[in-house]
Amino acid sequence: MSDKKVIDFTTGNPAKHILNFYWPLLMTSMLQQLYNFVDVMIVGQGLGDSAFASVGNMSSIFFLIVGFSFGLANGFGVLIAQSFGAKDIKQLRHRLAGTIQLSVVLAILLTTFSVTMLPTLLRLMNTDPSLMKNCLKYGYIVFGGISLSICYNVSAAILRALGDSKTPLRAIIISSIINLGLDSFFIFVLHMGVESAAIATVVSQVISAIICINRLRHIEMIQLEKSDFLNDSRIYIDLFANGLPMAFMNSITAIGCMVVQHYINELGTDYTTAYSACSKYLNLFMCPAATAGNAMSAYTSQNYGAREYGRIVSGLKVCLTISFITYIVLGSVMTFFPEFLAKLLIQGDAPIRLVCEYLPICGMTIIAVDCLFVIRSAVQGMGHPVPPMWSGVLEMVLRIAVIVLGTSNIGFRAAAYAEIAAWVGALAVNVLAFSRILGPNLKSVIDKPGIKQVQLSHIKM
């Protein structure tokens, strides 16, 4: 198989390249969110609000563990994309080999940690005793197979770094069909409990990982040899230096979400159910902008490696335009149709009423996080993961401060305001970082004789 699916973002029309890369990536992300959404909808409709709350209660813990691996994989992918953009294939292969080695170690450590610490994490979140049994049933199976999720995340990150967004799409289409088919069969035919949703998830992850790995095996430029795995310490240090801040950013954000979940759980199971539904919708409706961020990361990484700084500005305009369009559409749905959305997932009158309080608040302000995804990804793509990590710390602090101070005064709505505060604070940090990092690089290139005209032409859309 040739390398025709690989996209070189350093030449050609930026908007055309980004959109060609974005659409398969968006379909991949939406399918992931959609099958997660339908997954819990099947649980809620088939097993009731209590089972729905149990699975939803696991979301922040899942983000803590999987988010760490996802951040690390994306950090590794940035360096691979930079090597590809610089046309340094030897360095690319060494970085790829190092990524594989480190990912194996990561899978072992995270599986051990998540399975061992699951009961403790659930107690720290003040999980209602009536939900604990189902949480453990679901969690032990999902986290026992966490290495499969890591395998897919790493493989997909490498493919995206090389400009291939179509293979992860194919993987998700196939695995989603399998996941939803198994969910329905287990719950409605065999009448199994929440553990069936976890089993279906693990099986689908096996399929998606196999498809992505098979594609990687057929890309000629990254056919690894034994010598590629004989890396010096510098390769591992570079990978960790770029990957760990991104991983910690996700985990720090997850900790803030777990604290919010703790305060919500204290209010009772109706609140846990409502918050689970709201979280599912936020994740689903953030998806188009988050995908624009992933596209921006791959695009920025290649162009930063090639020193095509003007093209980064052009890419930023395209991705921010995508974010504004999706905000107008999806923000409006959250604002004006919260009751309809709530009834798709849950049944009780009290949780539905709570969802109707939360969603319109976030719907009107979700533009902040939509822009955050794009600008933060650009900063990470330029090989500067530390500012986004500190923005994650600020997110955590703001979430915790608002939920602690607000719950007693405004109740469930404090969770919505906690999200908004976190989004705005993190956006401000990343906007400042982007301007400080790219500005001097862009100016240094434009100021060179004979290059000014070329670089300025890249900035025009």
Image (cartoon, rainbow, N blue to C red):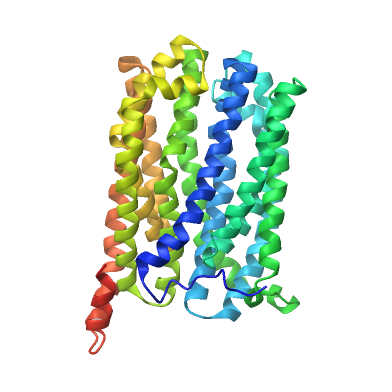
Depth check, front residue: 319 or 60? 319
Q: Is residue 43 toward the left or the right of residue 217 in the image? A: left
Q: Quadrant of residue 367?
A: top left
Q: Quadrant of the N terminus?
A: bottom right
Establish if 358 lies above or below 228: above
Q: Is residue 454 toward the left or the right of residue 170 in the image? A: left
x, y (%) of residue 277?
A: 48, 25
Q: Residue at coordinates 63% horizontally, 13% vertically from top-left?
A: 130
x, y (%) of residue 324?
A: 29, 47
**Residue 380 in sight from this viewpoint:** no
Q: Residue at coordinates 66% horizontally, 34% vertically from top-left?
A: 117
Outermost residue, right direction? 190
Q: Is residue 156 toward the left or the right of residue 342 in the image? A: right
x, y (%) of residue 326?
A: 35, 44
Depth check, front residue: 108 or 284? 284
Q: Residue at coordinates 67% horizontally, 53% vertically from top-left?
A: 151
Depth check, front residue: 339 or 406? 339
